[in-house]
Amino acid sequence: MESAILLETQDLEKNYTLKKKTLFGKKAEVLQAVNKVSLAIHQGETLGIVGESGCGKSTFARLITRLIAPSGGKVFFDQKEITAMAQPEVRSLRKDIQMIFQDPYASLDPRKRVLAILTEPLEIHGIKTAKERRELAYEMLEKVGLQREHASRFPHEFSGGQCQRINIARALILRPRLVICDEPVSALDVSIQAQVLNLLLDLQEEFHLTYVFISHDLNVVRYFCDRIAVMYKGEIVESGDAETIYQAPVHDYTKKLLQAIPKSIESNEE
């Protein structure tokens, strides 16, 4: 039996004006970063959105988290439209929708210790007492493979992989239902990528999470995701279960993405 739809987009659009209208009557140039994207994400699944840089996948992620406003279309979370929500409602929504960003260092405030970074979301939403927030932070550090003593350190004292674990801990400390993973391993060494991916899978099972996983790497998406949506020039050109997309792609752009994978990587996986 298929699980309920947690998040759905209907004809979602985001346009950017590149040049304003000139005195000579020329029309303004408009970039369609996201063009009428309609997707449904089911509770408990991992949907991969894959495409080259500039295809609109990160813009799509920011639209469904309400970090930016859409130019058109609608977003529904748990059957409730969130595109027209006022800021107080959006802030409340943050507890249910969190994001893990690509750059592990840039995502953390360098002036704050890890304990303050992890307890800040709880404090903003008025969750528990100060002592209970500290205990939750320590517990979350251990769940992502770090230790309690790491809470007193600053971000620059950690490796990239450790910083991304801290980012994961911060995203999950509010116990969200949906987590947007925007290229979460692309900035990490290859030897660390598999560790972080396996950690995300373990946490998904433990906390019953739903993931939207954004990547340019079809190999990573094939390993990590249940379904794949291929994005090209702001549009979804092909979607389906991960293995079908990998083994029998239909769209020419998907075929080109697969052809770009080094043969040595494909042979190692087989």
Image: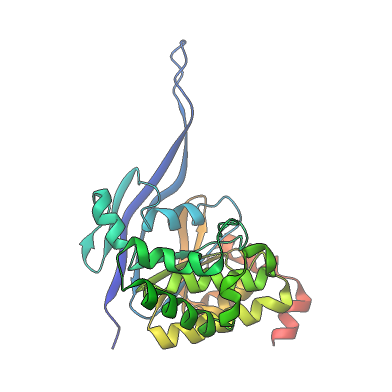
Give the answer, above or below, for where 130 lies relative to 63.
below
Residue 47 can be seen, yes or no: yes
Residue 79 location, x and y as percent?
Answer: 21, 66
- How many numbered markers are drawn? 0
Q: Residue at x 50, y 64 (%)?
A: 117
Quarter assignment of residue 3: bottom left
In the picture, measured across the screen, residue 77 lies left or right of residue 266, that is left
The coloring applied to the image is rainbow
Residue 12 location, x and y as percent?
Answer: 35, 52
Quarter assignment of residue 136: bottom left
Taking the view exactly as shown, the residue that stands out farthest to the front is 131
In the picture, measured across the screen, residue 234 lies left or right of residue 36, that is right
Q: Residue at x 32, y 73 (%)?
A: 129
In the picture, measured across the screen, residue 213 lies left or right of residue 193, that is left
- Towards the viewer: 173 or 110: 110
Residue 223 can be seen, yes or no: no
Taking the view exactly as shown, the residue that stands out farthest to the top is 24
Screen quadrant of the C terminus: bottom right
Give the answer, above or below, for where 78 lies relative to 235.
below
Residue 121 location, x and y as percent?
Answer: 40, 64
